[in-house]
Image (cartoon, rainbow, N blue to C red):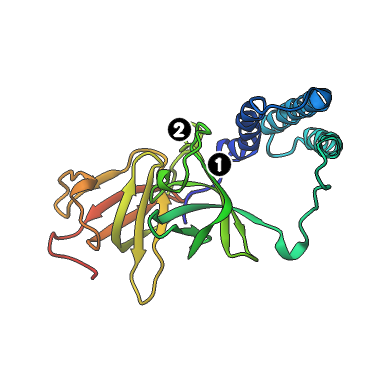
Amino acid sequence: MGGNLDVATVATMITKPAATIFVLDGQFKNLRFPPSVQPAVSSVLVDDANVEAALNAAALSPGCGCSSYNAVATALNHKAGGTARLRQLLGLPPATAPTSSSATSTSVGAVVTVDAQASTLTVDISSHDTQYAPCPAFTATSPTDTLLGLPGLHAGDYGIITVDPTAACIDLVSVLPPPHPPQCSTTGSNGAAVVAWEGYNPTSHAVLYQPTGQNEPVLVQRWCQTPTISNASGIAVPPSQIAPGTAVQLLISADGWITTYQRQSRSSSLR
């Protein structure tokens, strides 16, 4: 999967949990708790607001911001105590921390395929395609933190992906908004490659393609600025007219963004 983690994307990754907390708190407030536990509920909501504020402050300086990250840790620790008290008042057992064998792994990646009927999705993480089933508590959110569910995801969606390696399932796909100049820039050249076209996702600014060779994975590469799209004669071609499997030459900038893709002859196919 291509495209750099620019500062704007890093900041979005930090603020995403804060936005998710805000959405979940809205649902939490609609639950009917006994009057006796309402003070503890209010305390947890205050703790959540403090965690949101600390995360948003950390996002302002994602390159360092050490004091901001300490504030996040302090707010999370305080919330853990309040949550434990609420569970006790509700007669629930203490929450258990996951062991290292069941810890989740969070990466930035992209959706390659979605099969809602079979309840599976394939993701590209570090240029490796892996198919997973969604975990029982699977969550997918849009760039505006709207809950999507598995059918709401599309090939080429790029974002934060959390995998449970023990259960071999995906716990979370949080789609990130695409960067725009001046948040990103395309400078220099990192060469060109002829690949098999698989599709594109204009919302995520992503192209899906398969390198030449046997058993190559389908990868996802993004663009920063709208790329030049043409046929072999240099005439502009809408991407909707490029059939899957068509040979396409991709030009990549030095900082990892697609700048040009050119369809080879109409009869040229890598399948």
Q: Amino acid at mark 1?
A: Asp
**Number of residues whose C-alpha sits closer than 10 Å to that of mark 1, classed few (under 14), some (14–19) or many (20 or more):** some
Left or right of 136, for residue 218: left
Query: How much space separates mark 2 and mark 1, taking CA atoms?
Result: 11 Å
**Number of residues whose C-alpha sits closer than 10 Å to that of mark 2, classed few (under 14), some (14–19) or many (20 or more):** few
Residue found at x 78% / y 37%: 69
- Where residue 236 sits, quadrant-wise, is top left
Q: Amino acid at mark 2?
A: Pro
Secondary structure beneath label 2 = loop
Percent from the top left, x then y, of residue 75?
A: 81, 33
Residue 6: assigned label = 1
Left or right of 95, for residue 31: left
Left or right of 59, for residue 9: left
- Where residue 250 sits, quadrant-wise, is bottom left
Residue found at x 78% / y 35%: 72
Above or below: residue 110 compared with residue 56 = below
Percent from the top left, x then y, of residue 252?
A: 39, 53
Judging depth in this view, the residue of 137 and 90 nearest the camera is: 90
Identify the residue under disc 2.
Answer: 181
Judging depth in this view, the residue of 28 and 172 nearest the camera is: 28
Residue 212 shows up from this direction: yes
Quarter the C terminus occupies: bottom left
Do the CB atoms of the residues marked 2 and 1 lie less than 8 Å apart? no
Above or below: residue 50 compared with residue 13 = above
Residue found at x 56% / y 60%: 169
Above or below: residue 127 compared with residue 189 = below
Secondary structure beneath label 1 = loop
Residue 223: assigned label = none
Percent from the top left, x then y, of residue 148?
A: 47, 40
Q: Earlier in the sequence, mark 2 or mark 1?
A: 1
Judging depth in this view, the residue of 25 and 128 nearest the camera is: 25
